[in-house]
Image (tube, rainbow, N blue to C red):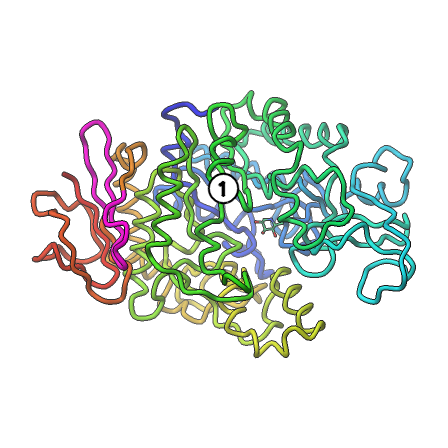
Amino acid sequence: MNPERTWWKNAIVYQIYPQSFNDTDGDGVGDLAGIIERLDYLDDLGVDVVWLNPVYESPHHDDGYDVADYRAIREEYGTMAEWEELLAGLHDRDMRLIMDLVVNHTSNEHEWFQASRTDPDGQYGDYYIWRDGTPAEAATDSPGPADRAPPNEWEAAFGGPAWAWDDEREQFYLHLFHEQQPDLDWENPAVREDVYELMNWWLDNGIDGFRLDVINLLSKPASFAGRDGSAIDDCVGGPRLDEFLAEMAAETYDDYDAMTVGETPNVGVEEARRHTGPDGPFDMVFHFEHMDLDYGEEGGWWELRDVELPELKEVLTRWQTQLDEGWNALYFGNHDQPRVVSRFGDDKRYRRESATLFATLLLTLRGTPFVFQGDELGMRNYPFESLDEQEDAMIVGRVTEAIERGDVASFEAVKELVRERSRDNARTPMQWDASERAGFTTGDPWLPVNPDYETVNAAAQRADPESVLAFYRRLIRLRDETPALVYGDYELLLPDHESVFAYRRVLDGEELLVVLNVDDEASSVDLSVDDATRLLGNYDEPTDTTALRPYEAAVYRR
Ligand code: NOJ
């Protein structure tokens, strides 16, 4: 299912993290009414599709990725009636809505899990992955009773073992993420049917597609014994994955004009080609190869590493050129990643220039671009001073465990790392204006507002034609008007250049040239652009086209 030209290839997607978008009732948490209030802002920006992070009923141990009821809206966010109003408001403005589908796991408060733990022989007894574990000598840091060891030594993504002991059922259950996020057992056909039913329920309610959370983890290995290390790494692309995904597509969205984007950790371009090609289950997938570049070779996530530009070019170029009939989902930030301008740009002296440079990269590559809320303002990482200021289950879980184990002496020892890695960097409230609490709320915001809000905010940028926001608008218009930017072939120029990222996009004789100086110093290149028309740039028209200024970005037509 990958037609040559279609609406979801042309679309610009805007990701809304509802908790931090706009609060209308003063409880410090964003809400659906807040999104409705800002629909014209999105329309003005040129957004075609909104991806809404989970808004379902949830105890929020992992910010909504622990769903307690798939058919109900979290009370803090509003009501189903407001959700319908939001959908209608989007559709009225020719925008579409995709919902986040989290079905690798549920919340432990979901009624399926509650029934599963209290009634092993009942209808939901086999909905989760329950095991007795093995008899063991007392193992001090293992979950469960002293004489039982979990089925294996897998580690969960948020720290600690991937197995938790349930006192009621007296068995271990598997959780790849938080202990409060038990994994569903996809081997059980009844689980699959229930999931398809809820997906169809949302499709029948009028949504336009799904973003599918960690969707390549559904099929677990046939045997658990003897496995250790990261549970996620071991579950990626499991034995029955393709079968489950094909069945899911056939039973649900294949019958609708829906857009699907799978979140697929550890996926390589070859698998992505299979997943998104003509016979694949998705339109596109999120891969992580460019996001992992700043992980250390030895220490991985625990080690910060400087990214060399040729490495970034190599990864992006491979994905640009090797997907064949598949399609790219393009992103440099989301609710799980630090802010792009802080991570890959210069968020101090060249904040505006580097934010607009990465916008240019995002919006001129082949694929569907996803803009994360606030990136269109060049929002930056938050200067966290302690772990107490953070809510992110991943950062708190990993760091607390490392301190308890003695692997890390104190928060101070990892402060720099935490500041760079915390997912809360992206989750601080949206900065609407320079009023107190950035116009996000009248109450006490659930996460602190970035102290830079007085200068970095939507109201100030709306009034400024040189702003990051104004540049995003122009860039989105340019992409909308230029099929070569959407469908054109991609060809990398200067592959080994240390600071300049340049490429061509070519379609039906039309040639676009994108030139980006990813550096805080000037660069000199000869790309013979003198005969080309400069369509857009983040500096004034230069007098000398061979000299690029710090973080200069420009798009030419030849
Ligand atoms: C990926 C989501 O984007 C992330 O926020 C979440 O913690 C995990 N999946 C688990 O659902």
Q: Is residue 234 above or below residue 26?
A: above
Task: Determine which residue is flagged by label 1.
Answer: 268
Q: Position of residue 259 (x, y in %)?
A: 49, 31
Q: Label the magenta part by its dominant secondary structure.
A: strand
Query: Which residue type carries mark 1?
Result: Gly
Magenta-colored span: 492-514
Residue at the limit of the structure toward the front, as seen here: 226
Q: Is residue 341 above or below residue 242?
A: below
Q: Residue at x 76, y 48 (%)?
A: 174
Residue neighbourhood size for the residue with mark 1, other residues' Cα within 10 Å, grouped as few (<14), some (14–19), many (≥20) = few
Query: Is residue 93 found inside the magenta-colored segment of the image?
Result: no
Q: Residue at x 12, y 43 (%)?
A: 533
Q: Is residue 304 above or below residue 43?
A: below
Q: Position of residue 461 (x, y in %)?
A: 31, 59
Q: Quadrant of residue 510?
A: top left
Q: Secondary structure at mark 1?
A: loop
Quarter of the image that includes the C terminus: top left
Q: How many marks?
A: 1
Q: Position of residue 210 (x, y in %)?
A: 55, 35
Q: Position of residue 403 (x, y in %)?
A: 67, 73
Along the line of sight, which residue is nearer the eye, 542 or 218? 218
Query: Is residue 499 found inside the magenta-colored segment of the image?
Result: yes
Q: Quadrant of residue 247?
A: top right
Q: Is residue 439 above or below residue 177?
A: below
> Image check: 382 left or right of 517?
right
> Image check: 395 left or right of 345?
right
